[in-house]
């Protein structure tokens, strides 16, 4: 697992965990934790985006509802800032802090990371923490602008369940790059699959209901051993490229397309 020296920003900003969602008052303990990692920007010294944080809340609430019986708690991570900022990989450092903080608060419970865009890259990078059992990367930002740089690491994914979801019309992050990453990840970890959301963009709004249903299926199966839908089972079992270009069908999970 990559280690990051986590310090505050010049103005004292530090990462935080957002308000917990889920776990009813009658629940005796937290059974599992999902940490949601919002999108960010390649280079920035500005504060974390309130809009990106708000965009992660519907997924947090939906997962909490789906996992209420298992004591699932979800929290959106509040970064120190919104920039990845090159080799500093600040969002990945904040994600690693958030995992350690969740373990400190809730004990030895399974953790799933769900990230979007730059937050998806942070989730994949931070997956090496022993508490992490699963990672879901939505429209991950995986740049290939520096061919001399080391490729994005995948060894930290070994032993985790990994799901990548990408819209085929994403103009912000290249879906072909997430496919290439998934090919490398599959070699390191057989429990890797990737779904393509045809005609959807970076925010995955067109098929938001289906994406949330897929997320709930994946998270509850990975953390609590619940049965999962056949497409997810097939995608995990299929060799490349089939299991890495699995189409997300309209109506997945019995939901209605928005």
Image (cartoon, rainbow, N blue to C red):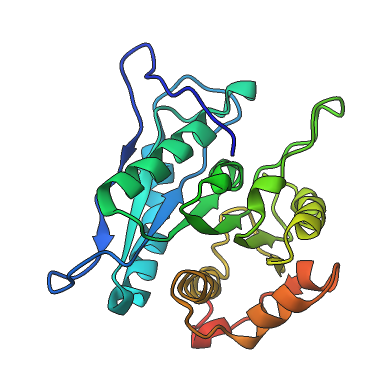
Side of 123 where 46 appears, left or right: left
Give me the residue at 29% from left, 79% from top: 69
Q: Quadrant of the N terminus?
A: top right
Residue sitting at x 72%, y 41%: 153
Residue 124 location (% of width, % of height): 61, 47
Percent from the top left, x then y, of residue 14? 34, 26
- Drawn side of residue 123 relative to residue 165, left or right: left
Task: Answer yes or no: is residue 245 visible.
Answer: no
Residue sitting farthest toward the top:
10
Residue 160: quarter of image: bottom right
Q: Is residue 172 above or below residue 2?
A: below
- Residue at 45% of width from left, 34% of height from top? 94
Q: Is residue 116 visible?
A: yes
Residue at figure coordinates x 61%, y 29% from the top left: 42
Count of marks, rendered view? 0
Q: Position of residue 78 (x, y in %)?
A: 36, 38
Query: Does 80 sit left or right of 134 as displayed?
Result: left
Camera-nearest residue between 198 and 136: 136
Viewer-nearest residue: 100 or 214 = 100
User: Above or below — where is 71 with respect to 150?
Assistant: below
């Amino acid at each position: 697992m990559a280690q990051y020296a986590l310090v505050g920003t010049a103005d004292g900003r530090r990462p935080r965990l957002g308000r917990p969602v889920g776990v009813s008052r009658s629940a005796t303990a937290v059974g599992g934790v999902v940490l949601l990692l919002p999108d960010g920007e390649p280079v920035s010294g500005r504060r974390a985006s309130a809009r990106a944080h708000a965009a992660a809340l519907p997924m947090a609430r939906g997962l909490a509802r789906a996992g209420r019986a298992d004591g699932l708690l979800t929290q959106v991570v509040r970064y120190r800032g919104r920039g990845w900022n090159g080799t500093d990989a600040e969002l990945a450092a904040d994600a690693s802090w958030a995992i350690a903080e969740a373990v400190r608060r809730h004990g030895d419970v399974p953790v799933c990371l769900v990230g979007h865009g730059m937050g998806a890259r942070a989730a994949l990078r931070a997956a090496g923490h022993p508490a992490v059992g699963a990672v879901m990367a939505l429209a991950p930002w995986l740049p290939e602008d520096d061919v001399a740089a080391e490729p994005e690491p995948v060894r930290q994914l070994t032993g985790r369940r990994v799901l990548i979801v990408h819209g085929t019309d994403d103009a912000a992050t290249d879906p072909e790059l997430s496919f290439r990453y998934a090919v490398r990840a599959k070699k390191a970890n057989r429990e890797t699959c990737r779904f393509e959301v045809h005609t959807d963009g970076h925010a995955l709004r067109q098929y938001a209901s289906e994406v949330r249903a897929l997320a709930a299926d994946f998270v509850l199966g990975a953390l609590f051993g619940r049965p999962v839908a056949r497409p997810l089972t097939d995608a995990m079992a299929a060799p490349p490229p089939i299991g890495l270009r699995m189409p997300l069908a309209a109506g997945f999970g019995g939901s209605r397309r928005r």
